[in-house]
Image (tube, rainbow, N blue to C red):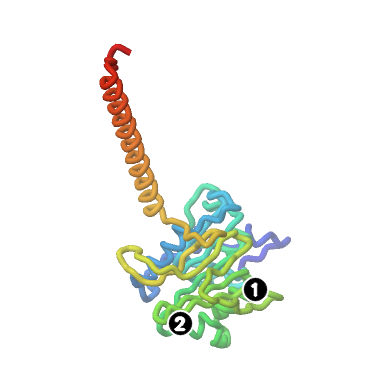
């Protein structure tokens, strides 16, 4: 269907992002609140220090087209990140989907949030039916070769992370400390706190010192608090200076010296 003679690169002959959008009015189901909030927190705290912001792309619930032989097949990760690529499609447009043969850069990390009924596929425990698309696990491990695959179950608060080693996923030890991803100079762990008015365990990015990366709201709050403390310190310094001047003036008067004449 897409072949030419002589053959041309897939990037020139196969459908593009504009042909393969994410919107599908017939696709059943909509994300629940957790599936909205958790990816947002991941995106807000994903700040790899070794990549400029314009070379970082993150997405949630966006169609990821992965097979040039079956250009209509896609997966829809709950959240994924690509680094070393323009944040905008061809450096000028917001993405409608992520088409691997156009982008030519695979995600570095994919996160799936378990839901009732998705656990077996998300964890690679299902088999492919004949003439059906491959499972998520197969796509991420064998086709896209995503270096890091993370699965989080909010019902049990269980975090499982896998790293691609020798072309297969190997489970990483999670002892409660954030999982370090050297390529990003970031860690990913479980943080207990309040986000969007909900207090619970959340997936969140941290820096090399295990400090949680602040969200924009938290960063602004910290800046406001720092400014408040700075202003308070300045007021205290000015008050201390005033009291010192008053004590000095009183001392001079006790010695018969008019401080206003100095």
Mark 2, residue position? 118
Occupied quadrant, residue 241:
top left
Mark 1, residue position? 164
- Residue 42: x %, y % from top left: 46, 63
Count numbered badges in the picture: 2
The residue at the far top in this view is 261
Say if 230 sits above or below 136 in the image. Answer: above
Nearest the viewer among 225 and 103 is: 225
The residue lying at 34 percent from left, 65 percent from top is 194
Occupied quadrant, residue 101:
bottom right
Say if 218 sits above or below 256 in the image. Answer: below
The residue at the far right in this view is 6
Quadrant where the C terminus is found in the figure: top left
Q: Is residue 205 shown left or right of residue 243?
A: right
| Mark sitting earlier along the chain (1/2) | 2
Tell me if label 1 and label 2 are in contact, CB under 8 Å: no
Dot 1: what SS? Answer: strand
Nearest the viewer among 214 and 86 is: 214
- Residue 141: x %, y % from top left: 62, 75
Q: Visible in this render: residue 190?
A: yes
Dot 2: what SS? Answer: loop
- Residue 73: x %, y % from top left: 54, 73
The residue lying at 35 percent from left, 46 percent from top is 224
Quadrant where the N terminus is found in the figure: bottom right
Say if 229 sits above or below 45 in the image. Answer: above
Q: Which mark is residue 216?
A: none
């Amino acid at each position: 269907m897409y072949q030419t003679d002589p053959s041309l690169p897939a990037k020139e002959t196969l459908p593009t992002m504009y042909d393969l959008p994410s919107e599908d009015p017939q696709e059943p189901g909509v994300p629940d609140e957790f599936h909205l909030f958790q990816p947002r927190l991941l995106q807000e705290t994903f700040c790899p220090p070794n990549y400029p912001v314009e070379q970082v792309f993150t997405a949630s619930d966006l169609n990821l087209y992965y097979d040039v032989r079956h250009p209509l097949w896609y997966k829809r990760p709950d959240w994924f990140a690509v680094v070393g690529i323009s944040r905008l499609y061809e450096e000028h447009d917001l993405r409608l989907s992520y088409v691997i043969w156009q982008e030519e850069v695979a995600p570095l990390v994919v996160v799936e949030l378990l839901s009732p009924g998705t656990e077996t596929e998300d964890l690679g425990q299902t088999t492919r039916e004949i003439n059906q698309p491959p499972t998520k696990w197969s796509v991420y491990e064998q086709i896209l070769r995503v270096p890091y695959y993370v699965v989080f179950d909010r019902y049990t608060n269980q975090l499982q992370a896998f790293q691609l080693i020798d072309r297969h996923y190997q489970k990483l030890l999670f002892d409660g400390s954030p999982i370090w991803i050297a390529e990003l100079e970031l860690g990913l762990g479980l943080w207990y706190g309040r986000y969007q008015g909900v207090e619970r365990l959340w997936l969140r990015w941290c820096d090399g010192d295990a400090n949680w990366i602040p969200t924009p709201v938290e960063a602004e709050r910290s800046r406001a608090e720092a400014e408040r403390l700075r202003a308070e310190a300045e007021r205290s310094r000015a008050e201390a200076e005033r009291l010192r001047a008053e004590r000095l003036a009183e001392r001079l008067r006790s010695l018969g010296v008019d401080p206003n004449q100095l």
